[in-house]
Structures are given as C-alpha cells and as structure tokens.
Image (tube, rainbow, N blue to C red):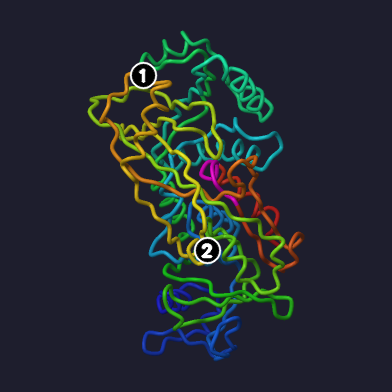
Amino acid sequence: MLPYLGRKWTRLSTKNLKQTWKLVNGDAISSRRSPVRGLSGGAEPIAKERVDTVVIGAGVVGLAVAREISRRGREVLILDAASTFGTVTSSRNSEVVHAGIYYPPNSLKAKFCVRGRELLYSYCSEHEIPHRKIGKLIVATGSSEIPKLDLLMHLGTQNGVSGLRMLEGFEAMRMEPQLRCVKALLSPESGILDTHSFMLSLVGEAENRQAIFSYNTVVLSGFVEGKKLHLVVAETGSLESRFELIPNLVVNAAGLGAQALAKRFHGLDHRFIPSSHYARGCYFTLLGTKSPPFNKLVYPIPEEGGLGVHVTVDLNGLVKFGPDVEWIECTDDNSSFLNKFDYRVNPQRAEKFYPEIRKYYPDLKDGSLEPGYSGIRPKLSGPKQPPADFVIQGEETHGVPGLVSLFGIESPGLTSSLAIAEHIANKFLR
C-alpha cells in the first residue's frame, strides 16, 4: 500500500528522500508537488519523488531483475498490482528447467535459456533451492514424427545444449517401462525446481540489498518531461493516494499486462508495442497411483502454441499432465493489465487429454485425471503463426528515455530469468 511505501522510503532510502518524505495521518506527503498527468478530472497536486530504478511486475523475471540491479549497488523499487509476488504466470507453469532445445539458433530464447539454465542450477545449489536434474525424454510415437525429433536434436546441438542423445524406442522404454515410443531424444540437462522457493529467495536477496517492494500498487500513466521519465502510481483499485516517481530506469516486466502497461506511456509510439495473444493452458493431476509412472519428464513432439501435453513430476511426487492450448479471444487491455482472466479448469477438457497422453502412456486409466490448475501464456504470435521470440526494447528502439520493456516472456521465461536480468543490467544500467 502507498502509505507503507512512504514509510519504507523514510526508513530505508537516500538522504534526499529522507529529507523530502514525511508521514501525516499515516499518508506519505512530499514537500514537492506536481500535477497528475494522463488522468481524467483535471490536474491536482500529488507527491513527487526521485528513485534510481523502478521494476514493474513482481513475477519471477521482475524479481530476478530487481535482485540483479540491487546487487550492483543501485536503488530499486518494485511495484506490483497484486498483494504479493509471483501470483500470475510465475506460479502457474510446469516448474521445469529447460535445456534450450526448441528455439532457433541465436534467438533470445535460445541464448537466455542456455545461459539461464546454467545460472539457475548454480543459484539453486548455492541457495539450497529444492531442485533436481531428472532429465527429459522428447518422444516420437510414430515414424512420421521422427524427422521432427531429428530437427530438435539439430537445434539443441546448435544452441550448445550438452549431453543430447538420440535413443531407439527400446532404449527409451528400458529407461521408462510405462513409456511407448518409436524413438526419443534424451536431454539430461532438463530438470525441475520449487519455483516459489526460488522467488522467495530472490525477494530476500533484493530486500537484503535495500530494494523496496510495494504491492497493491498500480502504474496509472507515464510521461516524459525534461528528458526524464515520470510515473504516476496509485493503490490498486483506487485513484486516491496517488504520487509521482521520477526514475532513471524503468523495467516493464508486467508479463500478461506488459503491452497494456506500455500503452499507458504517453509519447510511446504504439507501433513499437507488439500485438498480444493469450493462450490458456490447463493441467490435470494423476490419481490412483502409489508412485509416479515416470522418473523423467516426458514430452511429445511440440504442437502449435505449446510444447504438447507433457508429463511432469514435481518435487513432492505429484504427477501433472499439461498444459494444452486454448486461445483466448477478445481480451481488452484492462483485463490483461489487471489479470482478469478465467483460470478455472473445465473437467470436460480431460476428454481431450486422455487420447493425447495415451499416445506415449497407453496404460492411463479412465477417470484417473483430476482438474489441477491453469496458466495463461503471454504470447506474441497467434494461431497458425510461427512462434515469436522474446522482445526486449530499450530507448534505442522506441525513443522513451529510461524505459525498458519486456514482451512475450513465455516459456522458457522461468529458466531464462537470471540471464534476462543479467542482460538488462549489463546493457541498460548507466
């Protein structure tokens, strides 16, 4: 909340901020005032303050960016409209550490996935984050899929993924007796992790370096004045207690709402904001088994919009199948910005899961799938379009001083998070 933010500034921030902020009846008041811009109802004076870096979005990528920039001795303020960190895509995924197989060579996805995997495993080991490098089998269940499997092997090798090995069907089924396939690609570098523990550690590291988190805080608008970027922010769901920030650097890591947020920056040409496409993915959990049917991750050949209905085992032994792909139409900017998506899992979707899963797990029993959870992918490509790469835009692209926008950070965003943070700090810190 904003009063809390004011108290945190008073307690933790620089001498300039300590002199400027004071609390009156629990509210943060500044001696400097400026008009609200970009809001209806005319201008009114609000509190105004400078800060070095603002990260908008407390998902795993935003947290990684905040942690990396604070490590470099910079003042960081993290804003999120939700009541805590990691409530959206970061907590609604497969929790898989990807190796870097699927992506075109020299793409950002390929570079950041491979580098991010190395950083992530190292981080998890150093900070005792629960994780396991259990490996993955990408399987061809028919001879027609073998050329696609060969292509994945080629892509992974070009991307520098080590240890890849093509297996005949009998070799893969010897590893996983419940599996059925004609050929498989073994990726020993793939694994799983406890995403919440990872995010909690990033928060702790950032806070230990004096980074400040302000939840329930929404960015209403942004504008440039005197070659400086200004942000007008308020409490989520209210236009009261508004105040203005003047940061040197703003990182738009708003995930599903990144494009909608970018449109709130006055003077940012909308031709630099890529189109948004949203794909819901549902997960079902496996019932009635004393032990998981597989020890490794098992993935089919990728499908349009996703990696196929795969099987993952989390660190507690829970078996999950998914996600599928359901394109969401007619989503307006307000809905995406405020995360007004429908995350309910329709039990009837299991009817489509059973035949897909039985292609590689034929012993799956009727009635053994229970609705789990769903997530939304922030995609830059829609149905029938080729997959799009991550987009990271700075001033050199869109001309807005101090603004860095991250668009389309879908899978492998979790694996890539530390590498994305490293890239942003290296390229955009001045």
Is residue 325 left or right of 249 when viewed as pictured? left
Residue beneath disc 1? 362
Quadrant of the snapshot with the C terminus: bottom right
In the image, farthest residue toward the top: 170
> Element at badge 2?
loop
Quadrant of the snapshot with the N terminus: bottom left
Residue beneath disc 2? 332
The magenta segment = 408-415
- The image quadrant that residue 321 belongs to is top left
- The image quadrant that residue 383 belongs to is top right
Q: Earlier in the sequence, mark 2 or mark 1?
A: 2
Residue at 52% over, 63% down: 332
Q: Identify the disc placed on residue 428.
A: none
Task: Give the amino acid type for the residue marked by disc 2 in the picture.
Answer: Asp
Task: Give the amino acid type for the residue marked by disc 1 in the picture.
Answer: Pro
> Does 273 sit above or below residue 324?
below
Residue at 47% over, 72% down: 12
